[in-house]
Amino acid sequence: MTTLVESSVKNTSGLHPKGRAVLVLPHSIENELRARGSKIVVPQTTSDRAKMVEDRGILVEVGAAAWMDEPEPRAIVGEIVLTSKWSGTLFTSPLDGLMYKLCNADDVYATAEEGFLLNVLSDATKEAA
């Protein structure tokens, strides 16, 4: 399991989950393309649809009561997580302009290695074409 450097994951959304809630930064096709130096432009409608059902992302912040009834936390801040597709609420932060997913901690099902996000690029670019 790969954990991103926790100090590099900052919650700049202005929203702080409470209770059993967790805050996830969904995987973004645009961010991945930028990181690879690609000049492919993803149409806004494709991008919006992909974000609505995205089930991969980086755990940004965890509410105080998340996973208290479990022997160990399902994930820690900075890990890549898989969540239920239709769980939670998506919102765009007015502070940093990024789209976040706020969901119940029980909707986090697994952690993934860092390459997991990069391996889906080919599927995403096929959809955008």
Image (spheres, rainbow, N blue to C red):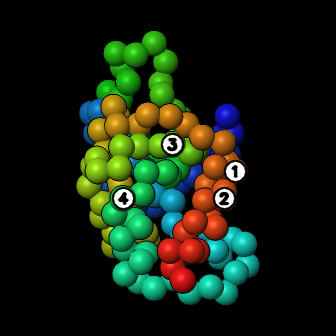
Q: Identify the secondary structure beneath mark 4.
A: helix
Residue 119 in percent (x, y) is at 66, 57
Q: Identify the secondary structure beneath mark 3.
A: strand
Residue type at tag 3: Val
Q: Residues within 10 Å of mark 2 (few under 14, many from 20)?
A: some
Residue type at tag 1: Gly
Residue type at tag 2: Leu
Q: Identify the secondary structure beneath mark 2.
A: helix
Marks 3 and 2, how far apart at CA:
14 Å
Q: Are marks 2 and 1 in contact (CB under 8 Å)?
A: yes
Tag 1 residue? 115
Q: Are marks 4 and 3 in contact (CB under 8 Å)?
A: no
Residue 52 in percent (x, y) is at 34, 63
Residue 90 in percent (x, y) is at 30, 60
- Observer-nearest of 40 and 80: 40
Q: Are marks 3 and 2 in contact (CB under 8 Å)?
A: no
Q: Residues within 10 Å of mark 3 (few under 14, many from 20)?
A: many
Tag 4 residue? 53
Q: Which corner quadrant of the image does residue 83 belong to?
A: top left
Tag 2 residue? 118
Marks 2 and 1, how far apart at CA:
5 Å
Question: Counting residues from the N terminus, which is met first, the one under dot 4 or under dot 3?
Answer: 4
Tag 3 residue? 81
Question: Counting residues from the N terminus, which is met first, the one under dot 3 or under dot 2?
Answer: 3
Residue type at tag 4: Val
Q: Are marks 1 and 3 in contact (CB under 8 Å)?
A: no
